[in-house]
Amino acid sequence: IGINDDVTHLSLPVTKDVDVLGDDVSQLIFYGIGSDGTVGANKNTVKIIGENTDFYAQAYFAYDSKKSGGVTRSHLRFSKRPILAPYLVKKAGFISCSLDTYVEKYDMLADIKKNGRFLLNTTKSDEELIEFMPNSFKKQLAEKNVKLYVIDAVNLAKDIGLGKRTNTIMQSAFFKLNEQIMPYEEAKELMKKYAYKSYIKKGQAVVELNYKAIDLGGEGIREVPVDPAWANLPAEEQKAPKGLPKFVEGIAQPVNAIKGYDLPVSAFDGFEDGTMDNGSTAYEKRYIAAFVPKWIKENCIQCNQCSFVCPHAVIRPFLSTEEEVSKAPENAEYLAAQGKGFEGLKFSIVVSIPDCTGCEVCVNTCPGKKGEKALAMMPIDEAIHEGRDKISDYFFNNVTYKSDLVDIAANPKNSQFAQPLFEFSGACAGCGETPYIKLLTQLFGEDMIIANATGCSSIYGGSFPATPYTTNAEGRGPAWANSLFEDNAEFGFGIRMGTETIRSRIGVLMEEGLEDPAISEEVKELNRAWLENRNSSLETKKISKALIPLLEKETAASAQEIYKLRDYLNKRSQWIIGGDGWAYDIGFGGLDHVIANNEDVNILVLDTEVYSNTGGQSSQSSPTGSIAKFTAAGKHGKKKDLAAIAMSYGHVYVAQISSGASMAQMLKAFKEAESYKGPSVIIAYAPCIAHGIKGGMGNSQRQGKLAVESGYWTILRYDPRLAAEGKNPLQIDSKEPDWDKYDEFLSSETRYAQLKEINHEEAQRLLELNKAEAQRRYNYYRRLAALDYSA
Ligand SMILES: Cc1ncc(C[n+]2csc(CCOP(=O)(O)OP(=O)(O)O)c2C)c(N)n1
Ligand code: SF4
Ligand code: SF4
Ligand code: SF4
């Protein structure tokens, strides 16, 4: 324990670790990718060894705060004597690493013993690997006389049909290389026994796949000879890019390299209050995907759907001018841009290779041409080899966004020409929540203030030192803060009241200015325009642009005060965001109180139908029969109808949306909610890893579509402005459901499909109730939508 306090000089010096454990203690570290199952496999390993040998076991798991795709470290010890040592392993005899790009990112060998063994999962050949490993890594391998083993678990898993799950293969490889703990054949039998327990709920087929993975893990290892001459390699030049923001260089990068512990107190100078620089995720460059999409331009219809659905804002359409084309890397690809106003521009779909999670949502959504998709996955090594990361670097940093050429809010295609001000978040690959937030920032990001409830959206939204909320070329972007789980609606409401109080002060000053002969006529004209259009984002944006430079020259006290308050001239777009655990349950009282008031706030509920962030506990949004934590045998109660509750007020704008079902309806709902001068509630169906979608999260958008087609989820909009015109305010936007597809939907998600296995007798009854409830809700909306409002 210690602290390097170079500010108050009250340091507690950090002493060197002392390792008092003998060589008879096996000390191991496993580097994994968040949600790849490494931690789960290690917990299993601890059970296997702890329960079946006379070894004592110690395990400690360290994570970052990415929802998935971050780095996990499992610190394990096994010994015949009781283990009296702090948890973090500092002298490992064996280190396993599930992702080869970590070799460049983390100083993993700092913690390996002399003569230790290092196991790496890589698709690279020996030659490619030797070329790829940085000198500092090779040098340590040679100096510490480490034995280097590799296994291509990625392709082994793919070949046997396990997709991206490499954890069991890596676990088996670990046992093969650590027979000092247990003979491999015995370990193999035990691994199979424990795999059966872990996976039988998912069916015998999954169990069999894991058996195969266990067999392959022992067979697929090869040793890569370490050249003793590597010890003499010169350390590589530090390639740190120039001009990085102070926050990124001084804090974010060391923390991301797992060197945050070494930071002195002075590194936090200027950041003492916990604020972060915007857009820090753009500097992470995680390279976590094994496969990334490539654009097949011949099949592209320039629809921008890939960009719309990408949960990570990684794939984007760019429009290049001739000049931008001339400066681009040679192998950049283009089509002639289609669309009014795009004459002379070139269209490209570009994937930011280092930020891609490989979720495949874009590929699965791409309509392509005549049945041929315009996107296909390719190995990331190949993409890098072809220089695709350099191309994306050029586009993302040098080609400007041409959003002013179109009305970005007119349709989903246009919306994607706007810069997302929420990018590269640490949400799970394929997350169903993030496309909603991304689109909001494309539409309103410049003037947005977000109050965020605790939940997944607060973790991927801002976990120190990473925030995906970023700024545009003019330095404008969303302001974001997280208060508590239980008070978020009130928190956002309070921010709105605060900003409006300041804007009211501007109004008073402008009224005063109109009477002041010292103020120019030009300024007065703009003051009048502002007073008339104070609540229009479009108009206030235009007015402030013209007014601010003029105010700078005015000497009157009122004008100077307005100049000081200039950040508040634009209408603010106040958003209150959170999950269903917040909105339906713990923050419901506050949400209800806020919508009962007639303030102009917009509430977005990211409805995963469970408390996703804490591992999938049941909420009032979870439907009957769904399996979640606390309802392991299927939920008996009903799903709350939040939309109906909100509609019952009459003055609240309400929408239910599902991006997979209708991008256009989702866009419409966002626009209407923002323009409505009262409270708005949008409930967004968000597929989540907690649902156990068959085929994985690459199908999240397809699932959102099926949910609506089958009647499981109804998309609708309730606009009180229509009632004022004598029209029915409620419109159901989905077609009459095809109820025959209902079972197809339920069977395609483990949260329902499993019920038949674990609660067979109840399954039919509960799932029928689930469907009956969906039908009741749909019929209720239909009746509401048919009411006559003309009288
Ligand atoms: C008062 C309180 N209770 C519990 C928690 C722990 N907690 C943090 S996030 C979360 C779940 C959030 O679920 P939800 O609102 O559905 O959002 P999601 O994670 O699904 O996006 C819980 C229970 C907390 N932070 N505060
Ligand atoms: S694979 Fe996923 S993260 Fe990568 S570009 Fe496609 S949708 Fe985005
Ligand atoms: S979704 Fe497919 S067709 Fe549409 S723009 Fe993207 S790559 Fe082109
Ligand atoms: S909502 Fe689900 S998929 Fe998205 S980040 Fe949270 S746990 Fe992952």
Image (cartoon, rainbow, N blue to C red):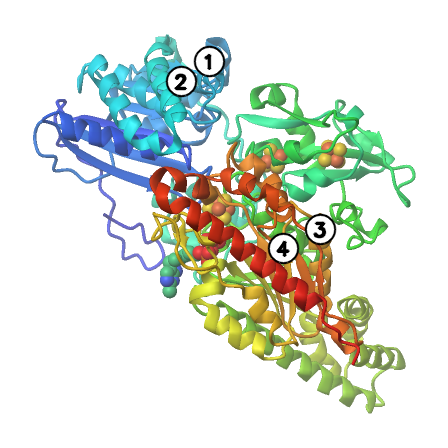
Do the residues bearing badges 1 and 2 touch, measured as CB atoms within 8 Å?
yes
Tell me the element at label 3.
loop
Q: Disc 2 or 3, which lies upstream in sequence? A: 2
Tell me the element at label 2.
helix
**Which quarter of the frame holds ligand 2?**
top right
Q: Which mark is residue 130?
A: 1
Q: Which residue is under mark 3?
A: 735
Q: Quadrant of the C terminus?
A: bottom right
Q: Nearer the viewer, residue 410 or 739?
A: 739
Tag 4: amino acid: Thr
Q: Which residue is under mark 4?
A: 714
Q: CA distance from mark 1 to mark 2?
A: 8 Å
Residue 270 visible to an observer of this rendering: no
Q: Position of residue 522 (x, y in %)?
A: 88, 78
Tell me the element at label 4.
loop
Mark 2, Cα crowd under 10 Å, few <14 / some 14-19 / many 20+, is many
Q: Disc 2 or 4, which lies upstream in sequence? A: 2
Whether label 3 lies within 8 Å of ligand 3 gets the answer no
For the residues carrying marks 2 and 3, which lies nearer the camera in this image? 3
Q: CA distance from mark 2 to mark 3?
A: 61 Å
Do the residues bearing badges 3 and 4 touch, measured as CB atoms within 8 Å?
no
Image vertical order of residue 344 relative to residue 425, above or below? above
Q: Which residue is under mark 2?
A: 138
Image vertical order of residue 102 relative to residue 160, above or below? below
| 776 displayed left or right of 328 | left
Q: Quadrant of residue 525?
A: bottom right
